[in-house]
Image (tube, grey):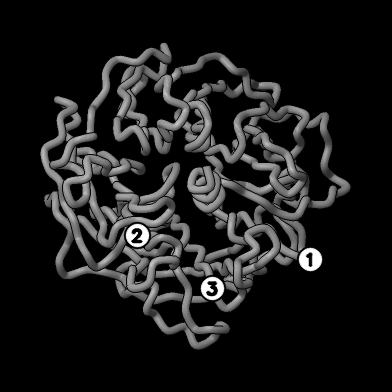
Amino acid sequence: MKTVNFTCTMLLAASCFVACDKDNSSEDVTDRAKLVLAIDMSASESTVGYIVPVGESLLNGGTASLALAHEVYASPYVEVYKDWAFNIPNAYMPPVIKRFTRQDDGSLMPDGELTLSQNNQAGAGNILFFSDAKAYASLMLENKIIIFNPSTMQKTGEIDLAKPEYGINGSSTPNPLGMMERDGKVFVGCLGLSSPPLSHDGAYMIVINAATDRPEKFISDLRGTGASFFGNQGMYRDEKGDIYVMCYASYGYAPGQKSGFLRIKKGSTDFDPDYFFNITDRVIPEIQGEHVVLTNFMYDRNGTAYIFGQNPAYASNPIDYANDLPIQSFKINLYDQTLTLLDLPRSNSYSHSILRYGDLILFGLATQSAGAGYFSYNPVTGETGKTPFLNVPGTILDAGVFE
């Protein structure tokens, strides 16, 4: 039980300081949702999470309201596809995906569920959509990918990855997580857990033929550790068609492991031997301690991406996940491997959401004195928000943007 609780806390739990209300917030706002947030309430000692729609009227200092929220399992993730929002449960909750449809009155209507497994420890992790009729859902701890129809919410098949040829050192437990499709191939990032949340040394991926739903290849690279992450926060494809894969390196708790980025170039199904953007060993003179470990990643455009780095210099021993503020925000360039510290408040260890909204990059932060929610960065002017662009009564663990 201790292992389960520790893993759940480290990988999925969220905790933050509750944001204060602004004058222009209102529980009666009913404009159509532009964002959907996956919020955790650990700071108030709650064991639930919420899926929360947010209209445009709140996106300039307002507060996300729980009036239109849907209660879900604690530490939730969310994926947006067209007008649907799909809740992915925390890895140690019953693996039931819930679907919500965006309504004109600003609400989300629950209209479908899919039980991925009868095993409550199966470990849902990510959804990959191919079409209205086909999607994959990864089961990290059951080592399967479930194939389902997102329109009918019916299971249509599964891909069993619990085999020695897909595990680390013949373990039969690749722990599939993040997924991305390119040119008919699905690249499945594997955590390769040894003693959760720690991963075996190295980054591992399974390549699946999207037409036949059959694994074709198992690839590895020992320069980074732990490929991809929960939700769609661990792999992105740039304008050239190259895939960049985040390596989280057991959050820095396994000596010798490196966090950073590996690349799979367009036309290849192997890691690029000439590319590794090592974040762990990068010296950053302007920060205390001069080093961070990569914890989250959002690709923007033209090689520019944004990350959260966990700075051990700001962590207690043992770390206080809710109250320590070790998370710092950075702008990076994946092509020339540069890194720039952004003038944003430090946050606690459970900050996981970075997204683009219009002309702004939004960082989900839980700060000590500036509140909790999305803080903005304007990549054109370089201006950073000193107060939340959107206040949130809890931690934003994940979010999606409706087109």
Q: Which mark is residue 229?
A: none
Q: Is residue 83 left or right of residue 283?
A: right
Q: Which mark is residue 311?
A: 3
Q: Residue at x 18, y 58 (%)?
A: 271
Q: Amino acid at mark 3?
A: Asn
Q: Nearer the viewer, residue 165 or 126?
A: 165
**Separation of residues labelled 1 and 2 (CA atoms):** 31 Å
Label 3 vs 1, first from the N-terminus? 3
Q: Amino acid at mark 2?
A: Cys
| Whether residue 356 is visible | no
Label 3 vs 2, first from the N-terminus? 2
Q: Amino acid at mark 1?
A: Ser
Image coords of residue 374 (percent x, y): 65, 53
Element carrying mark 3:
loop
- Which residue is under mark 1? 369
Image coords of residue 47 (percent x, y): 68, 37
Place residue 163 in its image quadrant.
Answer: top left
Place residue 33 in its image quadrant.
Answer: top right
